[in-house]
Each structure stands twice: as structure tokens, then as C-alpha cells.
Image (cartoon, rainbow, N blue to C red):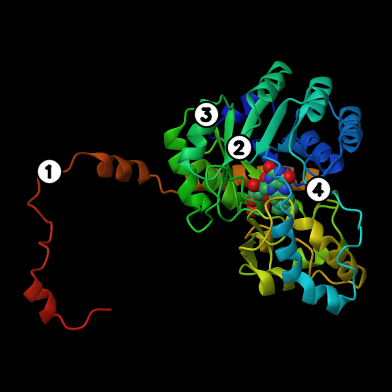
Amino acid sequence: MWPDYRLINLFDIELPIIQAPMAGSAFSYLAVAVSEAGGLGSLACALLSVEQTRKELESIRRKTSHPINVNFFCHQQPSNDPARESIWRRRLDAYYIQLGVDANALVPTSTRAAFDDKMCDLVMEFHPEVVSFHFGLPDKNLLQRVRRAGAKIISSATSVDEACWLQDQGCDAIVAQGYEAGGHRGMFLTQEVSTQLGTMALVPQVVDAVKVPVIAAGGIADARGIAAAFALGAAGVLIGTAYMLCPEARISPLYRQALKDAKDNETAITNVFTGRPARGIVNRLMREVGPMSDVVPEFPLAAAALAPLRAKSESAGSGDFTPMWSGQAARLNRELPAAELTKQLAAETLEKLRLLGTNASPDVFAQAAALAAPSPATEDLSIPFPRTSEKRSRGPSG
Ligand SMILES: Cc1cc2nc3c(=O)[nH]c(=O)nc-3n(C[C@H](O)[C@H](O)[C@H](O)COP(=O)(O)O)c2cc1C
């Protein structure tokens, strides 16, 4: 028995576990495996062309009849800023010289595109059961079309204000994405990362502020994390990094190895790869140019100037210029097929919840009742604030 069935019922799934959309790393194979196992698999489309997205959706619909989530970025596309671009390229000049690459070489690379009419046409055609957005929501017309296609709509919030805004715009559920999360922060009312909340603090405050189901995300990688999310009031979890070692995740051997080696304190939030803050495994570019830089072009334009550096260093087996997004809990990852991982996470969580219930000794209920009972009137126990002279007499303070 799950402590909360709102998400399961809303999405018509069997397990309250969503595989996070992960642009560039998670495609139809991973999504199908998770959905077939009873969770909700996600296809991230931000780095896919319309044609690639169509192929992935065709493949998903061929392989599973279970519900699926299709995910899009919805940032405002910035206009080119040649002055800023040139400052950014100058900042990278030493690397172009050191690696012997032409700074202006045209390296085939995908840019992160925002949800638009053409992608919306695909939503109308393939009718995904859930559509999720990152960086807020698209404009009202697009959103209405998605709704008319019959999809449940969700998006990420990194604060109570963002969660309330998303609820007001009609989101069916909200992902509360904590600081621990891998990849881009879904933040859209601010870009200030220094005040971003951790999952433990964010989830219950969002739960208190909205009526729709809340999905906890960020640093959740095993039964302990999932059980904790329920205790915080979430109706389910969205898990990214923990799926990255599944054979179905499409990542380079270099990235896979970095994830296997990553220790708890080896990720940081950086804007140097794209222009927006995202959490990844610390590497040379992050160390030397960031992790946060104020000369980086606006999202997603920063990536273009890095493309030749990334290509050259990857061909030499180095991840110095590669974004390797990861949450803070990579160390908990298990290398298992995605369906097996999903089922194990669910089974272990149910067992964890059962143990948490039964391990409490039988008199726990009596204890809880005693604690909840109104206490008899007590004398005033508050400690008076010390007068200045008293404070001084206590000697130097820490
Ligand atoms: C490699 C990677 C790529 C990501 N790409 C996306 C994306 O395309 N869309 C999105 O909504 N979230 C994206 N995210 C963020 C996840 O949706 C989610 O918030 C995060 O993975 C949760 O934290 P965790 O990685 O600690 O589980 C990405 C995360 C990772 C690790």
C-alpha cells in the first residue's frame, strides 16, 4: 500500500515513480522500460529536432501502451548578442590555443530549443498522457493546445512562489525540484541559485502551499529517499541521476565512468556550459572558468563556443569540456536495467515504509497520543534575554 495514490490515479500508472526527463541522455528505450515496469517514463525533447522527436515517439507508441511523459524546455530564446559572445570567446581563447582548435570551427551540435508550434503538433498527433515543462510554462495558446490534446500538464518549481504560479496556470501536479538535483534548475521567477532550497526543506513548504499533488525531485536515489519524500507530503518522486547507469541510458563511456567515480562532494552548480545554472560533475571548465561565470552568454547560447573544445577533448578521452549533469546522490546509483531498477525501488520503498510502521514498538501509539494530548498549564519557562551587562560578563562569544 502506498501512502498516497493521487499521482498514481492522476497518471493512471502503477508506481509513484517518474523517470526524470534527461535531454541528451534518456531516449525512448529508457522511457519505455520504466513505463512498462509500471512507473512513468519520460522522453526529453529539448535537444531533439522535430523529426528526431517524431521517431522517438513512434518507437515509444510501438513498444508500450502504458502512459508516457514528454518533456520540453520553455525558455525565451534570446537574441544574439555579438559583443557578449565575443567576450565569452575571448575568455575561452587560451583553451582554443592549447587544444589547437579553430574557435570558429563548425562542429555539429544540437542546441536546446524551446517548445513551439511544431513540437505542439507532435503532442496533438501522439497524445502523450503527460506533458512536462522546464523553466515555467509555454505561452497560453500552446498550453491550451496541449490541454486540448488531453495531456496532464506538469512543470518544475524550485520555490513556493513558483509552485503557486504553476498551480494558478492550471498545472495538474508540480515537481518540487531541490538544490540536490542534477541538470538544469527549473527555476523561472529568479535565476538566483544561492537561495535555492534543498529537497527536504522545499517539498513540505510546497505541499502546504498548493492543492495539486507534489512530486519530489533532487537527490532521491533509493528507498530511503522515496520513503522520506512521502513523509514530507509528496505524492510521488521524480528520479534522474539514479537512472543514468541503466544500460538504456544513452551516455558516453566517459560520462558513465565519471558517474561511477563521482563522490558525494564532486558535483556543483554551474552556468558555464549553457548560460543557466545546472548541477554537474566538477571538471576542468567548471573549475577554471566557473562554476558560475558572469561573462557567459544567455541560455542556451554559451554552448556553441564550447563545441569545438568539447569535440577535441572528448576525442582524446577527456571530459574537461563536457557537461556531465549529475545530482548529489550519484554514489547511490545501481547499474541495473531500468525496469528492474524501477521495480526494486518500488519494492524496497514499500518494505521500508512497512518497517518504519512496524519497527515502531507497539506502545508508539500510546506515546504519540500522550505527546499529542494538551499539556497541563505550565509555568513560564522562557529565558529572559540577558541584559547587556550580563552578556558582557560571560566573556568572549564564538
Ligand atoms: C542528465 C540530466 C539531464 C536533465 N535534463 C532535463 C530535461 O531535459 N528536462 C527536465 O525537465 N529536467 C531535466 N533534468 C532534471 C531532472 O528532471 C530532475 O529534476 C533531476 O534529475 C532530479 O534530481 P536527481 O538527478 O538528483 O534525481 C536533467 C537531469 C539530469 C541529471
Mark number displayed over residue 111 = 4
In percent of width and height, residue 103 lies at 86, 66
Going from the N terminus, do you reach mark 2 or mark 3 first? 2
Frontmost of labels 1 and 3 is: 3
**Distance between the Cα atoms at labels 1 and 4?**
65 Å
Residue type (three-letter) at the residue carrying disc 1: Pro
Q: Determine which residue is flagged by label 3.
A: 167
Label 3 secondary element: helix
Instruction: Tell me which amino acid carries mark 3.
Output: Gln
Q: Is mark 2 within 8 Å of ligand 1?
A: no
Q: Work out whether mark 2 precedes mark 4 in sequence or the reverse, and give the earlier one.
A: 4
CA distance for labels 2 and 1: 49 Å
Which comes before the other along the chain, label 1 or label 4? 4
Q: Residue at x 80, y 30 (%)?
A: 119
Mark 3 / mark 4, whichever is N-terminal: 4
C-alpha span from label 2 to label 3: 11 Å
Q: Which residue is mark 1?
A: 376
Label 1–label 3 contact, CB within 8 A = no
Q: Is tag 1's residue or tag 3's residue first in the polypeptide sequence?
A: 3
Side (left or right) of 257 relative to 390: right
Q: How far apart, in angstroms, are the residues tagged by discs 2 and 4?
A: 19 Å
Q: Which residue has dot 2 on it?
A: 136
